[in-house]
Image (spheres, rainbow, N blue to C red):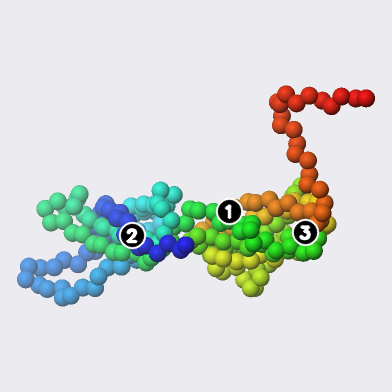
Amino acid sequence: REASRESPVRVKHRARREPSNPRRVERGESEGPQPEPTLDDLLDAIDDDGIGGERFDLLTRTLRDGRYRLRIVASDAASCPDEPLTAEAISDVFTVDNTRPRVVRTAIRRDGQGIPTAIPVSDATSPIAGVRYRLAGEREWRPAAAEDGIFDSPREVARLGPLPPGPGVVEVMVTDVAGNIALDRIAYRPPGAPQPRPMARSGGSRSAPSRR
């Protein structure tokens, strides 16, 4: 489900000094109608050294997934309490996505030997950015190809290259455009091959088999 709410996040900004060469308005003089300030207008006075204002970082990890708009209020009330001025702007809508994508294991397609050939992946909020895979024990990841030609939507199918006959395990890494990463391991084996025997748990009390 793609989140669709738009919640303004309010951030107050206090200017530390007046802009250089401000235009003075005499009593009775009218400046005329002024356009609403934009977010860029509020930030134009801030140079690389931070002169003209302050910089704030929004920690999106504290927000729920969804679509937001940022409201910024600039005020000089701290330095001019008698005649304070304020300006306000609202940003464009942006998406917060802190949830990892996933492999849709129930829809994995396999060939006649049980080898996975196409793996559906999905994300609740953001488009899929890419899928990589490797055999268990390998160090290098291989890029998977999008079945429709490009990874650009929240639901995609990744096509894998040739894999050796089983039994084996392929590891899959899925990344969304927000940078969230999901890892999954998919085991495969030829049809009719016995399931691998479970390994004994470490520290257990299972006795060794007797010899005859």
Q: Classify residue 86 as left or right of residue 110.
A: left
Of pointers 3 and 1, the one earlier in the residue sequence = 3
Q: Which residue is drawn at the image coordinates 63% and 73% (left, top)?
A: 148
Give the spatial CA distance, label 3 vs label 1: 26 Å
Q: Which mark is residue 110?
A: none
Q: Which residue is mark 2?
A: 7
Q: Amino acid at mark 2?
A: Ser
Q: Amino acid at mark 1?
A: Ile
Q: Residue furthest front?
A: 212
Residues 140 and 122: in front is 122
Residues 140 and 161: in front is 161
Q: Quadrant of residue 33?
A: bottom left
* Residue 144 visible, this angle: no
Q: Which residue is drawn at the image coordinates 67% and 58% (left, top)?
A: 132
Residues 5 and 52: in front is 5
Q: Which residue is drawn at the image coordinates 25% and 70% (left, top)?
A: 36
Question: Which of pointers 2 and 3 indicates the residue nearer the eye?
Answer: 3
Q: Secondary structure at mark 1?
A: strand
Q: Quadrant of residue 6?
A: bottom left
Q: Which residue is mark 3?
A: 114
Q: Amino acid at mark 3?
A: Gly
Q: Dot 2, crowdedness within 10 Å: few (<14), some or many (≥20)?
A: few
Question: Which of pointers 3 and 1 indicates the residue nearer the eye?
Answer: 3
Q: Which residue is mark 1?
A: 181
Q: Classify residue 33 as left or right of residue 44.
A: left
Q: Which residue is drawn at the image coordinates 57% and 61% (left, top)?
A: 122
Q: Position of residue 150 (x, y in %)?
A: 62, 71
- Contact between labelled residues 1 and 3, with CB atoms less than 8 Å apart: no
Q: Position of residue 159 (x, y in %)?
A: 70, 66
Residues 199 and 78: in front is 199
Q: Dot 3, crowdedness within 10 Å: few (<14), some or many (≥20)?
A: some
